[in-house]
Image (spheres, rainbow, N blue to C red):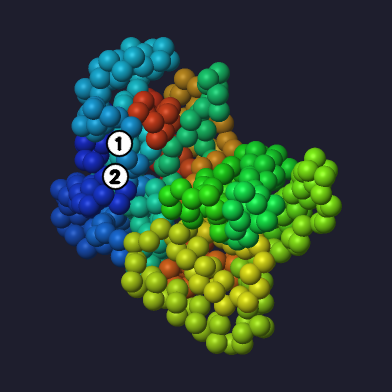
């Protein structure tokens, strides 16, 4: 059977896009969740079973916001096997639309405004084709959520086709710190206990796009890429610019770090024949306020690091290695420069006093405890806890820096140093190899779904083994050893005070994942657009067949 779903999914997508739900902005994410909940409550099935749909407040100190979910219990048999559908309802901001900001949520009128912005020939051609729907969130990823809404409606009207259960969770806060999915995991756990759900698979509907302009393929992704944020806090030795060799500039060390890390293909991670993109800098700054002729006291940087097979332990070891290499290089460079300067100035050269000094956060805490006793551990934990209570909205990366700065006050050695740490949330890599029965079942179901839908799709549908962008799929399973995650926590200054990765909660769900999602172009850009036929028709049909086969 092939579902006739195009028009309904299109209409649902337009409705969702018309509701501004920019991450962290008040009310938007909640308004979108309420709309989805009201849609479900308007269906006869949920009028009879109102306890099977819910709007769920996210556990988040920053702003009140909500997610929404609904589940259908199949009547084909007595199985409690359950498939989870997930998709996020928040979007990035719309400041990039400038004076056309209000049209970002108006798919009907936005294309005309884009033409006034002298859009590229590619965009103009896509507008003329009538094949794309434009708007913030149309691609990333309200169209995917709309497809799930349609499927919940379909199975609510045809529960006899389900030998098991189907739950669709539309979560907020994917674009920031994933509070939505983390709150959802707790709800999944509750349903597991109260309804007896046996989770067997998760289908995400996040977006994909071509790898280049010539790429005509559509993509389905098993598993997910992992992401870590190796971060570096660097202290130097200040000096007056007139005494350039009298100090050590932390910005010089960071610059060398960036040179060694950014776009370094030796740091790409490979598994199952697929390769991550190399790390790239996301922030590099010192702490000087205003202009002075004194060099900076300290600086920091952090870098995006994708993984397919590397554990957090591997990434930390590599990051520490690069910090040592950068420090060594800078000391050598500074001494060579100083020696040449001395020769030019006809003065005697003496080597500069700097020594390479690099710690991981775990090593630095152990060093300070050895120097200052157990009081240090208690102090730094209480400091971090109080900091989060006093400033709960502080950016997680800055929070980590503040904790390290406090720790450095206990350090009697004021020599320049680098502290390496993880500065952001952990997005776990998920690698599917067919090692479990659940993985084998999902791999087979998706393969059959693609085979069935391919004749209806005008483009080849290709399978890849790692979803290449950060998504909430990363919270549905764990491929790393628990010991590696515990080691990661020991290298996070925010651990258990502002941030905690609950291994037990994730392991309580722990299902294989696949991304059967929207397809289009220019996610997070003004010209964001979703390909309608593939997303509104092919994707829901592949998802439908995957659900049925998984529960068969």
Examine the rendered structure and indicate whether residue 117 appears above or below residue 184.
above
Q: Look at the numbered disc 2 and give the secondary structure of its residue.
A: loop
Question: How would you rate the neighbour count of disc 1 (Cα within 10 Å): few for under 14, some for 14-19, many for 20 or more?
Answer: some
Q: Residue at x 60, y 58 (%)?
A: 238
Where in the figure is residue 110, as x and y percent of width and height?
25, 24
Mark identifier at residue 362? none
Residue on which the image places disc 1:
94
Dot 1: what SS? loop
Q: Is residue 273 among the parts visible in the rendering?
A: no
Contact, CB < 8 Å: mark 2 with mark 1?
Answer: yes
Is 511 on the left-hand or right-hand side of 32?
A: right
Q: Which residue is mark 2?
A: 22
Disc on the earlier residue, 2 or 1: 2
For the point 38% across and 12% down, which residue is it? 125
Residue pictured at 61% horizontal, 56% vertical: 239
Q: Nearer the viewer, residue 143 or 511?
A: 143
Which of 159 and 461 lies nearest the eye of the viewer? 461
In the displayed structure, does residue 179 sit left or right of residue 201?
left
Q: Position of residue 44 (x, y in %)?
A: 16, 50
**Picture quarter with the N terminus:** top left
The image quadrant of residue 81 is bottom left
Q: Nearer the viewer, residue 36 or 344?
A: 344
Q: Position of residue 308 (x, y in %)?
A: 64, 48
Q: Which corner quadrant of the image does residue 343 belong to? A: top right
Real-space Cα separation, disc 2 to disc 1, in angstroms:
8 Å
Q: Name the residue rendered at 26%, 36% in the picture.
A: 17
Left or right, 45 with reference to 348: left
């Amino acid at each position: 059977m092939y579902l006739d779903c195009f028009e309904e999914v299109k209409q649902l997508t337009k409705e969702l896009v018309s509701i501004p739900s920019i991450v962290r902005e008040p009310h938007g994410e909640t308004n979108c969740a309420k709309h989805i909940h009201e849609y479900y409550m308007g269906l006869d099935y949920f009028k009879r079973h109102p306890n099977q749909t819910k709007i769920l407040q996210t556990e988040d100190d920053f702003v009140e916001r909500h997610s929404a979910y609904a589940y259908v219990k199949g009547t084909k048999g007595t199985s409690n096997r359950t498939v989870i559908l997930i998709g996020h309802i928040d979007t990035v901001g719309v400041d990039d639309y400038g004076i056309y900001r209000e049209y970002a949520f108006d798919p009907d009128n936005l294309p005309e405004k884009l033409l006034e912005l002298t859009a590229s020939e590619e965009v103009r051609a896509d507008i003329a084709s009538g094949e794309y729907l434009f708007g913030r969130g149309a691609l990333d990823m309200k169209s995917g959520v709309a497809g799930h809404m349609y499927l919940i409606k379909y199975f609510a009207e045809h529960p006899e086709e389900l030998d098991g259960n189907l739950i669709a969770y539309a979560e907020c806060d994917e674009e920031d710190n994933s509070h939505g999915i983390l709150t959802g995991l707790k709800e999944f756990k509750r349903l597991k206990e109260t309804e007896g759900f046996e989770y067997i698979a998760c289908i995400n509907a996040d977006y994909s796009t071509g790898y280049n302009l010539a790429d005509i393929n559509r993509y389905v992704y098993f598993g997910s890429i992992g992401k870590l944020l190796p971060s570096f806090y660097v202290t130097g030795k200040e000096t007056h610019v007139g005494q350039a060799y009298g100090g050590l500039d932390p910005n010089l060390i960071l610059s060398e770090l960036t040179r060694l890390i950014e776009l370094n293909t030796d740091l790409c991670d490979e598994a199952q024949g697929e390769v991550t993109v190399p790390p790239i800098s996301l922030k590099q700054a010192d702490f000087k306020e205003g202009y002075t002729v004194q060099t900076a006291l300290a600086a920091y940087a952090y870098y995006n690091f994708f993984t397919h097979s590397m554990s957090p332990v591997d990434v930390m070891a590599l990051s520490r290695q690069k910090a040592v290499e950068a420090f060594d290089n800078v000391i050598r460079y500074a001494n060579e420069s100083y020696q040449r300067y001395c020769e030019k100035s006809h003065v005697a050269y003496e080597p500069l006093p700097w020594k390479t000094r690099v710690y991981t956060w775990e090593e630095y805490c152990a060093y300070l405890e050895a120097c200052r006793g157990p009081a240090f551990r208690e102090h730094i934990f209480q400091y971090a806890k109080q900091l989060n209570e006093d400033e709960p909205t502080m950016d997680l990366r800055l929070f980590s820096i503040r904790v390290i700065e406090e720790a450095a006050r206990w350090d009697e050695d004021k020599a320049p140093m680098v502290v390496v740490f993880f500065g952001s949330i952990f997005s776990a890599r998920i690698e599917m190899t067919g090692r479990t029965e659940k993985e084998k079942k999902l791999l087979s179901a998706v393969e059959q779904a693609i085979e069935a839908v391919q004749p209806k799709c005008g483009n080849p549908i290709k399978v890849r083994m790692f979803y290449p962008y950060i998504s909430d799929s990363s919270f549905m399973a764990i491929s790393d050893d628990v010991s590696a995650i515990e080691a990661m926590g020991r290298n996070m200054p925010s651990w258990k005070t502002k941030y905690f990765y609950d291994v037990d909660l994730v392991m309580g769900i722990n299902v294989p994942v696949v991304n059967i999602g929207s397809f289009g172009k220019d996610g997070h850009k003004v010209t964001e657009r979703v390909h309608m036929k593939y997303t509104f028709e092919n994707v829901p049909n592949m998802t439908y067949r995957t659900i049925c086969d998984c529960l068969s």
